[in-house]
Image (cartoon, rainbow, N blue to C red):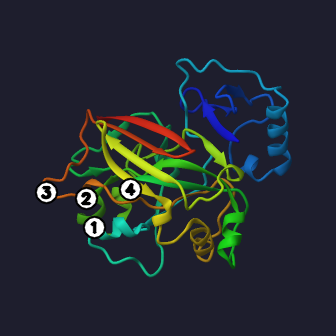
């Protein structure tokens, strides 16, 4: 299923995109698309049955904002340097173990919402990423297969980053990762049963219609199942938690000088095959 949330920010309603591309209202069946729903097999079954029976009312999509496809996100765990080609372009050694950092849940915005360039920023960068949404509580998992079994679904994430704040201002990466609007998510949460192989997904990103990133999740150093297993050794993952699994080559940081960092007025578009497409216009904060 392709689950999503539509409406004004803070007042989104749950919806479903059916096989014919028609937007369907879920608000008569569930309160929201969130961890509680994803952990409830019975509720998900009712959604699926209603969709298959044609019982869901259609929504007029004209002018309707698409919000983040997941509400009440617990935590966003991010994996750094998780593509072989991205490690090469930045001159970094491939990590022996996954690099973990965090984004606050309040960085999440809708897939087509405005992204704000932080004040005094000179190095705002783009990163298309596969987001993994957890559907079952994960603690000390023993295998990558168990890791995949705890995934409820997948979405497109834009891990916007300010490289000066991240790298040149001391401390950890957090200052460059948690600026306002720095995690567009969506348009859909695609349930795991629709993704035959999360390691075979092309992902691309354009800036002002120029292709910048053109990669595949097959290039991940640590695949999805192993990432979930690994993270579960250090923290408990709960339904509704999100893992951003890293970005392929093509970011501004890895390009020759003068590096083409983002500015107000730029337009970024990104997509992952089967998971939908995002578009953001940048403005000054």
Question: Mark 3 = which residue?
Answer: 257
Which mark is first along the chain, 2 or 1? 1
How far apart in space, not on screen, are marks 3 and 1 (Cα)? 13 Å
Which mark is first along the chain, 4 or 2? 4
Res 253 label: 2
Tell me what residue is drawn at x 56 percent, y 69 percent.
227
Which mark is first along the chain, 4 or 3? 4
Report if the CB atoms under discs 1 and 2 are less than 8 Å apart. yes
Asked where in the image residue 21 lies, by quadrant, the reply is top right
State the SS at label 4.
loop
How far apart in space, not on screen, are marks 2 and 4 (Cα)? 14 Å
* Label 2: few (<14), some (14–19) or many (≥20) C-alpha neighbours in 10 Å: many
Question: Mark 1 = which residue?
Answer: 90
* Label 3: few (<14), some (14–19) or many (≥20) C-alpha neighbours in 10 Å: few
Tell me what residue is drawn at x 46 percent, y 38 percent.
278
Res 133 label: none
């Amino acid at each position: 299923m392709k689950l999503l949330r539509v409406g004004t920010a803070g007042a989104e309603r749950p919806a479903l995109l059916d096989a014919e591309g028609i937007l369907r209202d879920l608000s008569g069946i569930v309160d929201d698309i969130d961890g509680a729903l994803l952990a409830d097999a019975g509720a998900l079954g009712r959604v699926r049955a209603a969709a298959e029976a044609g019982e869901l009312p259609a929504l007029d999509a004209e002018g309707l904002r698409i919000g983040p496809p997941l509400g009440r996100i617990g935590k966003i765990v991010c994996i750094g340097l998780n593509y072989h080609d991205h490690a090469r372009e930045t001159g970094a050694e491939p990590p022996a173990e996954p690099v973990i950092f965090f984004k606050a849940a309040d960085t999440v915005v809708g897939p087509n919402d405005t992204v704000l360039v932080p004040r005094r920023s000179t190095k705002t960068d783009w990163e298309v990423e596969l987001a993994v949404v957890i559907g079952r509580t994960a603690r000390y998992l023993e295998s990558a297969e168990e890791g995949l079994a705890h995934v409820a679904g997948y979405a497109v994430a834009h891990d916007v980053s300010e490289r000066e704040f991240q790298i040149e201002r001391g401390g950890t990466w957090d200052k460059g990762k948690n600026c306002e609007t720095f995690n567009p998510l969506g348009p859909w949460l695609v349930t795991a049963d629709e993704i035959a192989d999360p390691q075979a997904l092309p992902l691309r990103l354009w800036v002002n219609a120029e292709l910048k990133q053109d990669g595949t999740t097959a290039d991940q150093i640590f695949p999805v199942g192993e990432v979930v297993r690994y993270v579960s050794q250090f923290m408990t993952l709960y339904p509704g938690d999100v893992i951003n699994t890293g970005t392929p080559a093509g970011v501004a940081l890895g390009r020759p000088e003068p590096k083409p960092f983002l500015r107000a007025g730029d337009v970024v578009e990104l997509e992952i095959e089967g998971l939908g497409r995002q578009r953001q216009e940048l403005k000054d904060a």
